[in-house]
Image (cartoon, coloured by chain):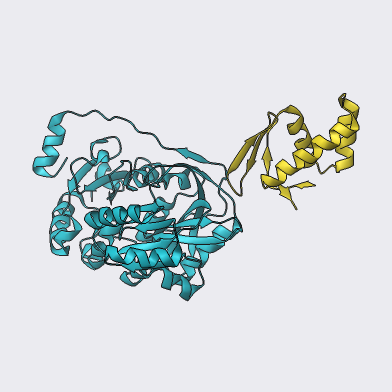
Chain colours: A yellow, B cyan
Amino acid sequence: MKLKSNIATSENGFIFNPATGDSFTSNGIAAEILAYMKLAETEQEIKKRILDKYEVEPSQLERDWDDYMLQLKEANLLDL
Amino acid sequence: MYVSQDQQKSKALTIAVTGLNANDNPGPGLAVIRALREGFRDELRIIGLAYETLEPAIYLKDQIDKTYQIPYPSAGVKALVERLNYIQENENIDVLIPNFDAELYNFIKIEKELLSVGIKTFLPSHKQLEERDKVNLKAFGDKNNFKIPADEVIFKSSDIEASAEKFGYPLLVKGKFYDAYVVQNASDAHKAFHKLHAKWGLPIIIQEFIKGTEINIAGLGDGKGNAISVIPMRKMYITEKGKAWAGITIEDEKLIALAQDFAKATNWKGGFELEIMKNDKGDLYIMEVNPRFPAWIYLTVASGQNQPKALVDLALGNPIDEFSTYKTGKMFIRYAWDNVVDVEEFQKFSAFGEL
């Protein structure tokens, strides 16, 4: 899953797609994942970071990850 | 020879602008003036040209130095030339920028007469104006490979049924010059027909409805096939009249290419606006081509490309600023403001046609 290269994000979770003019707000953990994605980290690298940093079961992370990626895809923010 | 200091100073540029109706269906005049003031700073005198006494920008004295009333387009070119000659004797206008679709035909017609008294313009030709007219838009698109929604030009309300059968509801019912209604059924279609007929005359255009995202593009053609500036804007807040009340600049190569293709296909000279509908598949439909700057033209300045200033430079034969980039994510949010004036000002303009 790769974020489109022109997507602008801010530390407070604001996401702007300059190609469509759409903007979104995201919570802290979503913004953190986006920041890792912008650094071109792989899915596995990001998941490892989250598991190391937060108290979350791998199965829960998988479910939330899939849900979040679906949202990003629907928002037209992923380079598919 | 002694030359006084005042005479050594270069004369301030005098630019006349129409479209001062900054109301809920705004003319572009005030935004054009704002762009020019930012582009030329103090070396500028703005002459407003107004048709009606309640065009709001007439009374904005910090924006317009003097306003003259001019005759409606229906009065013909002779009346317009007489009035402009009178204004020119007093004001020494360098460049005139018309901003209404309905007045353009006359201004193009008197282009040479204006030039003979020192007033320069930068306008499309009658042929260019006709080609992109709502009535001819579909044929224009077919000829030049632009996607245009299917439409039918009708003169009788009884023709609505046949169009509706062909396209299905919802439909777009459009006036000859301005205004459009999205209608869901025959009853609303007839109402829209009669409203538009009363306001703008015949014909009426019945257009296939395209669902999608509304995007407008402001452009400036140099008359040689080049679009020297193109700024796309997505509408974020749309009024009941379909006007953008808030918008944001966006980055999309396909939109830029479309505007460049339009300028190339037409050799467009002057400002233009493409009204685009982008459907789910990403297809870009041209809904309308406006032969002038849009009311949101100041956003081009805010995003780094001052199109009105560039138009004036082109009209004067000056070198123009090179536009290579613009800022995306620049937004405009329009607002209404009550300007308070004394009745004497209104009276003066009403009685003498000058303020």
Question: Residue B11, how many percent across, how many down?
Answer: 28, 48
Which residue is at 40% across, 63% downward? B164
| Relative depth, front residue between B184 and B237 | B184
| Relative depth, front residue between B339 and B227 | B339
| The C terminus of chain B sits in image quarter | top left
Left or right of residue A15, residue B160 in this image:
left
Left or right of residue B158, residue A39 in this image:
right
Q: How many marks?
A: 0
Q: Quadrant of residue A22?
A: top right
Which residue is at 17% across, 28% downward? B342
Note whether B224 is above or below B308 in the view shown: below
Q: Can residue A29 be seen?
A: yes
Note whether B240 is above or below B133 in the view shown: above
Which residue is at 36% across, 47% downward? B32
Q: Quadrant of residue B157?
A: bottom left
Judged from this view, the residue extending furthest toward the left is: B351
Question: Residue A51, how many percent across, how many down?
Answer: 89, 30
Which residue is at 78% across, 35% downward? A33
| Relative depth, front residue between B223 and A17 | A17
| Relative depth, front residue between B70 and B305 | B70
Judged from this view, the residue extending furthest toward the bottom is: B143
Left or right of residue B137, residue B29 in this image:
left
Question: Residue B240, how many percent across, how many down?
Answer: 38, 43
Q: Can residue B179 be seen?
A: no
Question: Residue A73, how many percent across, how many down?
Answer: 71, 46
